[in-house]
């Protein structure tokens, strides 16, 4: 099993550009989520999904979109990048919403100029 | 919604010594889990130890143990015989079983190990 994979590892964008951060897991997990990590802020939840076709907002959803068309994939879309979105992004998954072991991807470092 | 507070932004420990990282949390739920994650410079999030709230016995994993004080809503991590490889950011986190099942993180403690 590859676990949770994320692409790209690094990305530089200009203000106003759009892009998609990819996340995939091969563990047949129902629950997937996206976090952003900023210095001194810990990890904050952006969006999450409890299963294919079901998504919901987390603590900091503004400026981001998600969809979940398959169990395996959970892409995060930045519609119009802003410097405030410069961060490290982590995708995570766990077997089900109530299950307690969560697996993290390696992260994507995004810089918006 | 739950909150997690780590009051020590940075700590240091001598190699082979013991260090304790503090964490307090607040949740109105009776069913929850608590975690400590390690994040080395590689950025990978690594689960160090977990504690189920319904268990009174403190969790241990080799050199890592917790002091879980449920009434005080405290969940500290003790690292014994500290090693250079323990140097990392450590995050405390809480997962509740109700609503959105969100995993909420503290802001982290940066641990340095002095040779």
Image (cartoon, rainbow, N blue to C red):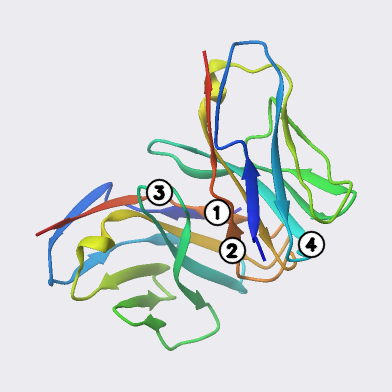
Mark with earlier residue (3, 2): 3
Vertical arrangement, residue A61 with respect to residue A105, above or below: above
Whether labels 1 and 3 share one chain: yes
Chain of the residue displaying label 3: B
Query: Mark 2 — residue?
Result: B95
Q: Position of residue B18 (x, y in %)?
A: 17, 72
Mark with earlier residue (1, 2): 2
Residue B28 is at least partly visible in this image: no
- Which residue does the image show at 39% across and 69% down from the upper left? B75
Chain of the residue displaying label 1: B
Query: Mark 1 — residue?
Result: B104
Is the Cβ of the residue at disc 1 closer than 8 Å to that at disc 2? yes
Q: In the rendered image, which quarter contains the C terminus of chain B?
A: bottom left
Chain of the residue displaying label 4: A
Q: CA distance from mark 3 to mark 2?
A: 25 Å
Query: Mark 4 — residue?
Result: A30
Mark with earlier residue (1, 3): 3
Whether labels 2 and 4 share one chain: no
Q: CA distance from mark 1 to mark 2?
A: 6 Å
Is the Cβ of the residue at disc 4 closer than 8 Å to that at disc 3? no
- Which residue does the image show at 14% across and 61% down from the upper left? B13
Instruction: Assign a secondary structure to mark 3.
Output: loop
Left or right: residue A67 versus residue A78 is right
Nearer to us of marks 2 and 4 is 4
């Amino acid at each position: 099993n590859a676990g949770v994979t994320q692409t790209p590892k690094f990305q530089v964008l200009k203000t106003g550009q759009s892009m998609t951060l990819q996340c995939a897991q091969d563990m047949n997990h129902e629950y997937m989520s996206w976090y952003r990590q900023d210095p001194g802020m810990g990890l904050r939840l952006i969006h999450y999904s409890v299963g294919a076709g079901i998504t919901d907002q987390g603590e900091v959803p503004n400026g981001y979109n998600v969809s979940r068309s398959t169990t395996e994939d959970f892409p995060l879309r930045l519609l119009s990048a802003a410097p405030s979105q410069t961060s490290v992004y982590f995708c995570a998954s766990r077997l089900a919403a109530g299950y307690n072991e969560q697996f993290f991807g390696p992260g994507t470092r995004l810089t918006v100029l | 919604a739950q909150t997690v507070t780590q009051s020590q932004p940075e700590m240091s420990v001598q190699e082979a010594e013991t260090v304790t990282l503090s964490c307090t949390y607040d949740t109105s739920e009776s069913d929850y889990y608590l975690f400590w994650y390690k994040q080395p410079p590689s950025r990978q999030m690594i689960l160090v130890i977990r504690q189920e709230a319904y268990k009174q016995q403190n969790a241990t994993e080799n050199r890592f143990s917790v002091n879980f004080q449920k009434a005080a809503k405290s969940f500290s991590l003790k690292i014994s015989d500290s090693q250079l490889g323990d140097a990392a950011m450590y995050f405390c986190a809480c997962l509740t079983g109700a609503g959105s099942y969100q995993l909420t993180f503290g802001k982290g403690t940066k641990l340095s190990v002095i040779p």
